Amino acid sequence: MHLTLDPVPFDAPEAHALRTAQQAELHVRYGSEDHEPGEQPTAANVPFFLVARTEDGRAVGCGGLRPLAGGGLEVKRMYVLPELRGNSVATAILRRIEDEARARGVAELLLETGMGQPDAMRFYEREGYHRIPAFGAYVGEDHSVCYARVLGAPAATSGSAVGPAAAGAGAAGAQPGVEPGAGAAGAECVLPNR
C-alpha cells in the first residue's frame, strides 16, 4: 500500500474528522464519553500531528505528540480507519512519530491506552513498547495502561513516498511504501491509544 505521512495542524479538517471517528469508536468500547483522564489534546498542546493518506489522497490514519509537564513526549490520538487496519498503516504512523520524537531530543517515548483496547496493547508490545507504571494524569486510573519505548537510531528507509510495504523489513531495514522514517512493515493497524 502506498502511503504518505503529512504533518498537519492538529485542528486541520482531516485530522479533526479522524479524531472524531476515533472518539466515537472509543465511546462504544468504554460505554461512555468520559473515558480519558487528564487534559484533552488540543492544537495548543499537541505541536506535532500527522495524517496518513493513501495514494488517492484519502486520509486513513493519524497520530501526534504532546509534551509532558516534566519533560518528554507522549503519543496522542493514534488512529487508523477500521477498514484499513492490518495494512501497516499504524506501524508507519508510529515510526514517523518516533522519528519526530528523536528529532526533538527525546530518548524515551511514553503513551497511554486503555483496558478496553486489547488490540492496542498487543500492537504496542509487538512494536517494542513495555508496560510502565501510570504517569501524569493516568496515575490511579483503573482503565489506563501506560507504555514506554527507548528510542534507538532512526529506521533506515528509502524514497519519500513509494510503493508496497516490504513485509518483514524490520525496524532497522528499508521499508518502501511510506515516507522516510516511517519504520517497520507487517504489523496490524489498530486503534492504538486515546
Image (spheres, grey):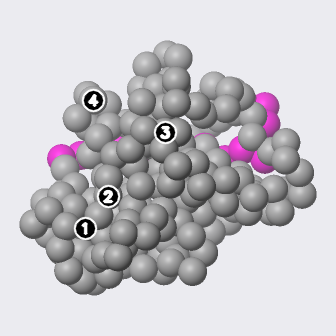
Q: Can you name the residue that lies furthest to the left here?
A: 158
**Going from the N terminus, do you reach mark 2 or mark 3 first?**
2
Q: Is 5 positioned to the left or the right of 152 in the image?
A: right
Residue 149 lies in magenta, yes or no? yes
Q: Magenta residues, as a range?
A: 139-153
Whether residue 3 is situated above or below residue 140 in the rendered picture? below
- How far apart are the alpha carbons under marks 2 and 1? 7 Å
Q: Quarter of the image containing the N terminus? A: bottom left
Q: Determine the CA span between mark 1 and mark 4.
A: 21 Å
Residue 17, image x and y in percent? 59, 55
The alpha-carbon separation of the residues under discs 3 and 4 comes to 18 Å
Instruction: Name the secondary structure under disc 1.
Output: loop
Question: Mark 1 vs mark 4: which is more N-terminal?
Answer: 4
131 left or right of 7? right
Marks 2/1 in contact by CB < 8 Å: the verdict is yes
Give percent across and percent down for residue 82.
60, 75
Check residue 5 in the rendering and tell me which mark sits there, or answer none.
2
Dot 4 or dot 2: first in sequence order is 2
Marks 3/1: CA distance? 21 Å
Q: Looking at the image, is mark 3 or mark 4 nearer the viewer?
A: 3
Label placed on residue 104: 4
* Numbered disc in front, either 1 or 4: 1
Dot placed on the residue nearer the N-terminal end, 2 or 1: 2
